[in-house]
Amino acid sequence: MDLYEHQARELFAEHGIPVPRAEVTDSPKEARGIARRLGGRVVVKAQVKTGGRGKAGGVRLAADPAAAELTARQILGMTIKGHTVGTVMLAQPVDIEAEFYVSYVLDRAAGRFLAIASAEGGTEIEEVAATRPAAVARIPVDPAEGVTPAKAGEIAAAAGLPAQTADTLVRLWQVLVREDALLVEVNPLVRTRQGQILALDGKVTLDDNAAFRQSRRSADAAEHGDPLEAAAAAKGLNYVKLEGEVGVIGNGAGLVMSTLDVVAGCGARPANFLDIGGGASAEVMADGLSVVLSDPAVKSVLVNVFGGITACDAVAEGIVRALDTVRLTKPLVVRLDGNNAVRGRAILDARRHPLVQQATTMDGAARRAAELATAV
Ligand code: GDP
Ligand code: MN
């Protein structure tokens, strides 16, 4: 999950990285009050999860509270690279002497982290990296050793950053480790004319697989994520909302991924990814069905199960019991194969639900579900 700049800024501040004073709002009127509190002159910054805001006119200086209100009004509602601006951050302006770039990113191929740093930070960093790669230092970081003060000194020296940035480099590493981030980036990290080091912009990508041990994140996800995904997460389901009309439920991530492909191959679009896992109990099936059916875009549902340790008859019992608790409002195509498939199919047949039909192959089931979804 990517964070907004103001969320990244909060994390930086919590870990002792100096940041300018700032507040967030979605109201131009409030922006005026915030500017007053921050001393009058402010930088008004669009809060969108994309870079290049400065170049797009989403980062602007306002000379006084009245100008801050006007600027906030102009920036709110703007679209930057397809992202609509819903909130702005107002920050105390800084007298910049030099702009640096620093980031830590997971280098999956190498199985370690990479520190990337440059003394030529700011809005042209991509250009610098493309035209003069030597101006951007790339230093491997061993995850077990991390960024010690000595390592920070090495990174600063390699990139040509002043030695006084070392403390921030160490703390930024602590943000990455303690918050379970895959990426932390500060661009620009600045030295002010007063000689202070400040993080003026921040980008943080959190590792969603670590969310379970970062308890305060769940509230955030519920607030900012897709409501269906939040409801599914609350039930412990592995669900991802997609853009189509065929609801998909399967057991095992690989099988569900293939099912999405087969649905797409039949000319329909999958509405979601939902892996109910190996167990596939009646309760999980009922939870899964209720989440998928509550998506208004869904026109048909495809259940694709390959019986293994949990045999098809158990899955079929699960579906039958789920049909008692969830009101089926859309056609359901079920394909059961693998362990005890014949017995499973017989159990579903015996239920004789008017909206449930069975198919024996994955392709056949996907074709039927696609037809049902596109017919209406
Ligand atoms: P981005 O374009 O999305 O990366 O947004 P940034 O927050 O990095 O802002 C873009 C540029 O605006 C920075 O590189 C700075 O040059 C400039 N900027 C941002 N905040 C301030 C500030 O407080 N004072 C001054 N003088 N410039 C700022
Ligand atoms: Mn930036």
Image (cartoon, rainbow, N blue to C red):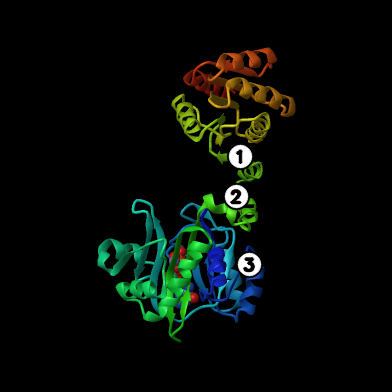
Q: Secondary structure at mark 3?
A: helix
In the image shown, does 50 or 71 lie closer to the viewer?
50
- Of discs 1 and 3, which sits in the foreground? 1
Q: Residues within 10 Å of mark 2 (few under 14, many from 20)?
A: few
Which residue is drawn at the image coordinates 41% and 59% (left, top)?
105
- In this view, the residue in front, 308 or 296, is 308
Disc 2 designates what residue? 225
Give me the disc on residue 340. none
Q: Mark 1 touching mark 3, by CB under 8 A?
A: no
- The amino acid type found where label 3 is placed reads Pro
In the image, residue 155 above or below residue 111: below
In the image, is 129 to the left or to the right of 21?
left
Q: Which residue is mark 1?
A: 237
Rendering coords of residue 289 (x, y %): 65, 31
- Disc 1 residue type (three-letter): Leu
Using the image, determine if residue 134 lies above or below residue 229: below
Q: Looking at the image, which is closer to me, 329 or 341?
A: 341
Residue identifier under label 3: 28
Quarter of the rendering occupied by the C terminus: top right
Report, in whole angstroms, how far the alpha carbon at label 1 lies from the one at label 2: 15 Å
Ligand 1 occupies quarter: bottom left
Q: In the image, is the residue at mark 2 within 8 Å of ligand 1 by its beta carbon?
A: no
The answer to whether any part of residue 106 appears in the image is yes
Q: Hey, what amino acid is under mark 2?
A: Gly
Compare marks 1 and 2 and give the one earlier in the sequence. Answer: 2
Q: Position of residue 215 (x, y in %)?
A: 63, 56
In front: label 2 or label 3: 2
Q: Position of residue 130 (x, y in %)?
A: 28, 61
